[in-house]
Every structure is written in structure tokens, then in C-alpha cells.
Image (cartoon, grey):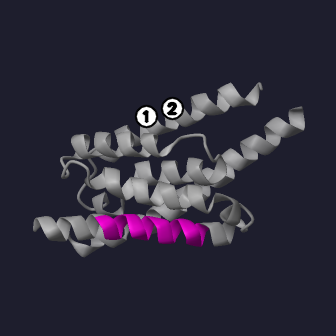
Amino acid sequence: MARSPRRWWISGLSLAATLALAVVPLPDVIAPFRPDWVAVVLLYWSLMAQRHFSLLTAFWMGLALDTLSGALLGQNALALLVIVYLAEKFHLRFRVFPVSQLAVVVLVLLGLYEFILFWIDGMAGRTVPLIERWVPPLTGTLVWVAMHSLLARDERDARARL
């Protein structure tokens, strides 16, 4: 019981921080390497703490991201819904994987996220440079692995104290 409110607080704060990180201006040199922060954090909480957030959270975070980034309204919402749905649907199958295989799963889900955005941008006639489209899943996977190692270590430390 004591860990549950703490986890809700950390996850809620992480979702708020991702929206801020998603719109912070970066220099042109490193801007293409910006991970998809909202997708990475939603995938983390969907894979590591199922039912912690629902598909409704993914939808609202996607709409907030669309509004803040100036994307087509619903574009990120749809893409986030798809990847969070898949992460929650196969949650128990993915949880038995070691971290290296989980990283591959995250890379595939982030690649699917980018493909959905690519598809919607293509239908709308909007072009995005390839480096800005396909590098973020790689950097997002690295961020996910770092996030997993930090938060999993924190969880192990909390269990050891009990």
C-alpha cells in the first residue's frame, strides 16, 4: 500500500515532464535525435505497471502533444493509442523477456509509432526529413533502457527496505 501512492506520484510527474521535454527547443544539430518522450514514458508504464494508466491517458497525452507541437490534431493520439494498446495486450508475454529483448520490443513499438505518424503525414502531404523520422526510435529505446534500469533499481531498493 505504501508503494502505490509513491508510484502514482512518480508516474504522474513523469508524464507531465514528458510534455515539457517534447516541446523544449533544441539546437538544430541535436534536434533530430530527440526521443519521442511521451511514447517512451507511456510504453514504460504500460510494460512495467499494467493498468497503471489506461488507453484514455494515452489518448489525452497524444492530444496534448498534438496541441503543443502543432501536429495534426489526433495524429499522436492515434499512434500512442496503438502502441499502448499493444503493450498492454501483450504485457504478460513481454514481462518475461530479459531487458535486452524488451529493448527490441520497445524499438519495434517506437518504430510502429513513427510509421503511423509517417503514414498520416503522407496522407496529409506533409514531409519530414528521414533523420527526424527514424532516429528517435533508436534514441527513445536508449532512454527507455536507462529509465528501466533506474526505476527498476529504485523498486528493488524499496523492496529490500521492507
**Residue 75 drawn at (x, y percent):** 26, 55
Mark 2, other Cα within 10 Å: few <14 / some 14–19 / many ≥20 = few
Q: Is residue 2 magenta?
A: no
Vertical comparison of 120 with 73: above or below = below
User: As shown in the figure, which amino acid type bears the numbered disc 2?
Assistant: Leu
Q: Residue furthest left?
A: 125
Instruction: Left or right? Give the position of 117 relative to 146.
Output: left
Quarter of the image with the N terminus in it: top right
User: As shown in the figure, which amino acid type bears the numbered disc 1?
Assistant: Ala
Determine if residue 52 is in view: yes
Q: Which residue is mark 2?
A: 13
Image point (28%, 64%), residue name:
117
Vertical comparison of 32 with 24: above or below = below
Image point (80%, 44%), residue name:
156
Q: Which mark is residue 16?
A: 1
Q: Which residues are magenta?
A: 103-116
Cβ atoms under marks 1 and 2 closer than 8 Å: yes
Q: Secondary structure at mark 2?
A: helix
Predominant SS of the magenta segment? helix
**Residue 86 drawn at (x, y percent):** 52, 61
Give me the C-alpha separation between circle 1 and circle 2.
5 Å
Image point (74%, 47%), residue name:
153
